[in-house]
């Protein structure tokens, strides 16, 4: 299980991180690990179960891809095979 400090370190050491809030509650996040020049690995996109199927993950992924494209970084996906349909 990840601690708050683990999550903080993961996000601050990422090349790009995005967060979605409902008022003060964090309901979704995603991040990119990158060299900032050529390749960016998209990982850890998640949305709380009660907020899923509302387009939040899709919007975060669109913004992640847009950020990569603006910085000429090619986004690549890193996930277990069973989650591929989630990202599609």
Image (cartoon, helix red, strand yellow):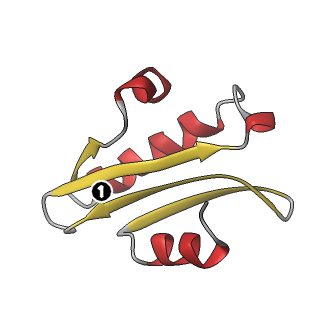
Farthest right residue?
A: 23
Farthest front residue?
A: 1
Residue 6 image offset from top left, x and y in percent? 55, 73
Q: Classify the position of the C terminus by image quarter.
A: top left
Residue 33 image offset from top left, x and y in percent? 31, 62
Q: Which residue bears the numbered disc 1?
A: 70
Give the side of residue 59 with respect to residue 33, left or right. right
Given residues 21 and 71, the one toward you in this image is: 21
Residue 81 image offset from top left, x and y in percent? 35, 27
Give the side of residue 54 with respect to residue 60, left or right. right
| Quadrant in the picture for residue 70 | bottom left
Res 34 visible: yes
The residue located at (74%, 36%) in the rendering is 49
Above-or-below relation of 19 to 9? above
Res 88 visible: no
Above-or-below relation of 73 to 61? below
Q: Classify the position of the N terminus by image quarter.
A: bottom right
The residue located at (60%, 79%) in the rendering is 5
Category of crowding for the residue at label 1, using alpha-carbon neighbours closer than 10 angstroms: few (below 14), some (14–19), many (at least 20): few
The residue located at (45%, 28%) in the rendering is 83
Count of labels in the image: 1
For mark 1, give the secondary structure.
Answer: helix
């Amino acid at each position: 299980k990840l601690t708050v400090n683990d999550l903080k370190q993961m996000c601050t050491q990422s090349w790009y991180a995005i967060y979605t809030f409902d008022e003060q509650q964090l309901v979704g996040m995603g991040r990119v690990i990158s060299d900032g020049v050529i390749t960016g690995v998209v990982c850890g996109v998640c949305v709380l179960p009660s907020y899923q199927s509302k387009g939040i993950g899709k919007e975060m992924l669109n913004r992640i891809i847009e950020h990569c494209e603006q910085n000429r970084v090619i986004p690549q996906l890193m996930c277990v095979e069973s989650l591929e349909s989630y990202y599609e």
